Every structure is written in C-alpha cells, then in structure tokens.
Image (spheres, rainbow, N blue to C red):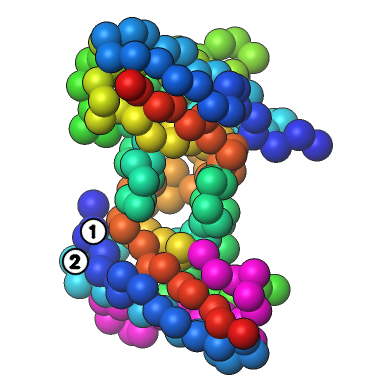
Amino acid sequence: LAKTTQPISMDSYEGQEVNITCSHNNIATNDYITWYQQFPSQGPRFIIQGYKTKVTNEVASLFIPADRKSSTLSLPRVSLSDTAVYYCLVGERGFKTIFGAGTRLFVKA
Amino acid sequence: DAGVTQSPTHLIKTRGQQVTLRCSPKSGHDTVSWYQQALGQGPQFIFQYYEEEERQRGNFPDRFSGHQFPNYSSELNVNALLLGDSALYLCASSFWPSSTGELFFGEGSRLTVL
C-alpha cells in the first residue's frame, strides 16, 4: 500500500480557497487517490476520488499531475463549517482502505 | 434511506471485560468494515466482512473478532479489554465489489476502558 504524506495542520480564513497537497511517491498503477473529510465525533465522509488529471464535484476539486506522485485537494471559498480533518488515501478501489493521520484544517472568521 | 447505524453510541467497560459492538449497513450494501480510531489519530483498519466471512484484516490481535449476519449486519467483539482499547470504533459499509471503493461510515461507538 502506498504511503501518503500530508501536512499535519493548516489554517485559513472564510472565503479563501484552500489547497491541501498529499505526497504518494510509490503509488502503484492500480491505485486511486481518495479524500475523506471527518468532523469531531463523526465517521469520515467521502469527498472525491481520482486516478489522473483533474476531477471536480460539487464540493471540491482534485488535481493529479501526470506522474501521480502527489495530489492536491482544492476547497473553494471555505466556510467555518469546513473546519475538519482531511484524509488522503491511496490504494486499489475495494481493497482495504487505509487512513493516515490526516490534515487538520482550521477555518477562521 | 437509513445510513449506517451503530450501537451502542457510548459504553464504559473495565479491563479484562469483553465488549460487543453492532453495525447495520446502509441499505443495499453487503460489505462491512470496522475501524478503530484513537483520540487524535486516523482510523485504523481492523477487518472487513463480506458474505459472512472475514475477507481482509489489519494488524490487530486475535482479541478482535467479528461476525456478519445473513442480513449483512455485523458485530465487532473485543475480548480481554486493555486500557489501550479505548477508542471510537467506526463501522463502514460498501458494495462488493465496489466500483469506487467509497465507504459510508456510521457515527461510531465510543468505548472507554477503565
């Protein structure tokens, strides 16, 4: 399973765009990149998944360069309610999903 | 459409006791995974059940065991509880096979071992 490295914490202000980068140098051919969000005392929630290039949904964008050794989760115009822990996961879809320590995002007014 | 439900939400046990946690998957899902999340840490994979069999297992001792029932619900059992077993235990459900691997999590059962 590919190991991921992401910042321990980040601060932002309401209305700003937040980019969280995840490093996964030994990603395998069959691996996908998935991001989850977790609020305190709740289970993680799937945000977005991608294999290469760019993926966008109603809440976030995921940018993956051609070498796939890193990825960036982009949250547009964050609000206080986006304060949470964000996890970057790399692995085969359907295989055991392994979480790292995540990035604690704190959005300030 | 009910999501993943877990019970109990909170419980307190003493060292050496045994505990059983329960999970009902999201409607239509047939696969259940269990995770342990210590305070300030990411969720750690315990095991996954499909067709009433353990399919994948993380690095947890045999004190952690599980079961899946014909209706896809699942139980997590922990024997001989240690103080270090205090954590939030999360259940996640999905399809098998999953086209995306997306997991749907419950809100967890918070276990405190005294």
* Between B61 and B11, the one nearer to me in the picture: B11
Badges 2 and 1, same chain: yes
Name the residue: 40% across, 16% down.
B13
The chain letter for the residue carrying disc 1 is A
Q: Earlier in the sequence, mark 2 or mark 1?
A: 1
Q: Position of residue A28 (x, y in %)?
A: 25, 62
Kindly identify which residue carries mark 1.
A2
Name the residue: 36% across, 84% down.
A65
Marks 2 and 1 sit apart, C-alpha to C-alpha, by 6 Å
On the rendered image, what quadrant is the C terminus of chain B found in? Answer: top left
Kindly identify which residue carries mark 2.
A26
Q: Which residues are magenta?
A: A62-84
User: For the residue marked with disc 1, what is the amino acid?
Assistant: Ala
Outermost residue to the front: B114
Residue B58, placed above or below residue A74: above
The chain letter for the residue carrying disc 2 is A
At mark 1, the secondary structure is loop
Name the residue: 49% across, 48% down.
B101
Residue B31 placement, left or right of B84: right
Visible residue check, residue B39 = yes
Residue A73 covered by magenta stretch: yes
Quadrant of the rendered structure where residue B33 is?
top left
Do tag 2 and tag 1 residues touch (Cβ < 8 Å)? yes
Residue A62 placement, left or right of A80: left
> How many neighbours does mark 2 have within 10 angstroms: few (below 14), some (14-19), or many (20 or more)?
some
> How many neighbours does mark 1 have within 10 angstroms: few (below 14), some (14-19), or many (20 or more)?
some
